[in-house]
Image (cartoon, coloured by chain):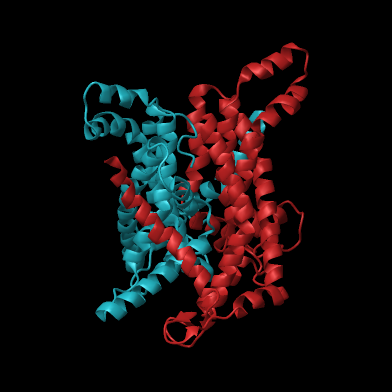
Chain colours: A red, B cyan
Amino acid sequence: MRRWLLLPPFLWLLLLVAAPVAILAVIAVSEGSAGVPPFRPPLSLAEGWQGTLEPLRLLLADVFYLDAFLRSLLVAFATAALCLALAYPMALGIAASPARWQMPLAALVLLPFWTGFLPRLGAWIGLLRDGGWVNRLLQGAGLTAGPLPLLYTDAAMLVGMVHAYLPFAVLPLATVLLRRDRAVEEAAADLGATPWVVFRSVTLPLSLPGALAAFLLVFIPAAGEFVIPELLGPPEAMLVGRALWVEFFQNRDWPLAAALALALLLVLILPICLFQRLEDAGEARGSGPS
Amino acid sequence: MRRLGLALGLAFLWLPILLLVGYAFSADRIPFQWGGLSLRWFRALAANGRMLEAAWLSLRIAAGAATLAVLLGGLAGWALARFGRFRFRALFGVLAGAPLVLPEVVTGLSLLLLFVVLQGAAEAAFGWAPGRGAATVLLAHATLGLAYVAVVVQARLAGLDPALEEAAADLGAGPFTVFRTVTLPLIAPALAAGWLLAFTLSLDDVVVASFVSGPAGTTLPMLVFSQLRMGLTPEINALAAMVLGLAALLVGAAALILGRNGRVGDSAG
């Protein structure tokens, strides 16, 4: 009887998640056209196979796209690594604080994420531009004579990315650290281990699934990020998200944009599967990284 | 040492936001430059018709999408946690989790292509098709929200003993009564938290909305993004200060709900 209740969400997901990805794959082998929409269906009843592998070939042949992919992966890796480095001490701090402070501290980490990320990027634009706070501080301290070009650089982009994604990294880490069994650490300390040895040989290994989940939770969306590089990064730095946006909105090359999306999905399929396995393992144990 | 790490991290997160809120009350025309205390930019915001219109549209889309997401995602999370093995369970689980892990540009582009194909089909069948705009954004955001609600509800149910529901059934309650009197009250906090999460996600989304929207569907984030591309204005600071105030209220409400019934991380997604 209640099986029928499964139908609405299942049909919804088939129509709005499965079908779109399938259509993406079809458009990626279509020929572009000047019409509306700007592609020709690759398979028609009258003419048979009309598709082309040209968009996919172009992706592999043009070093521009390969470059964009490598750059995106590098930026995503750097963002995730920086987030993890900042988030780990924060999560430890939350887990080590008294129980009644844990919820408000977690809320303090979450609240910026709910502030709206565009205004936060706006704040970074205001802080990093030539007459902005950072440059005024540097000049006031006599460290630099004139304003440094800080905005529209890779560094500005990374700062913006880390600022946007940091809450995503703190929460899974705080969750594993809060749920860990303190008795193991106490036992190690009773047996004569110094605090550093306890941390390195007990706390750190116990928190690894959470750390990996935190890394992937940042890495996966960061690899396809569009808005932050567009607003803070150097204009010439082409990342996959931007390349896709430009092909779609400016060049109106839908097949190529679809091919880029498909390629991004293919590149990320391994981290995505790894992340879902971690989640499932966590649920099975009842102490998931999420 | 641990306190220091937490303090530094929170300072990094909060300093730009606090500066932004402070300078929202500055009279100067250049953002982040102090020109005396003033509510000038809040008044400018209140008189900005385009901004108000976009904000109203965004609020309606977010409320509609969050409500749809709670209905569908609640069912999905319940099924994943309580229905045991059923046919295509693995596929169902992957589809329900996919919007959480797909990059925004992929979600946006693929949903737009779906809407274009559906429009083409409707055109061929009826000679007329509805245009893209607020409705397509709502459908896209409901799909994103569904995935988040499903995760939160599933996590909540996984932490609850099925014996509660079984006991009610043993005492003669029908499946609907069990759901209404036992399951629903137990997952209500997760549903509320999921609604808030879906609501804020929708209010924050630029990329997916930019792909699937049409000429008549400019949401607030789309408008703010196009303004930021041209340059920062103090009005955006004033807007951010107001959004932060609202978000603080919502998070306070969510913390109260979760604080009574759950632990940290239950709503982390």
Relative to B99, say whether B54 is above or below. Answer: below
The quadrant in which residue A44 appears is bottom left
Relative to B257, say whether A197 is above or below. Answer: above
User: x, y percentage for residue A200?
Assistant: 75, 28
User: x, y percentage for residue A205?
Assistant: 70, 30
Residue visible at 65% across and 58% down?
Answer: A156
Residue visible at 52% across and 33% down?
Answer: A284
Q: Is residue B230 left or right of residue B185?
A: right
Closest to the observer, B62 or A280: A280
User: x, y percentage for residue A248?
Assistant: 52, 75
- Taking the image as drawn, is residue A69 in sight? yes
The quadrant in which residue A166 appears is top right
Relative to B114, say whether A193 is above or below. Answer: above
Residue visible at 71% across and 25% down?
Answer: A202
* Picture quarter with the N terminus of chain A: top left
Closest to the observer, A63 or A132: A63
- Taking the image as drawn, is residue B39 in sight? no
Relative to B48, say whether B162 is above or below. Answer: above
Closest to the observer, B33 or B261: B261
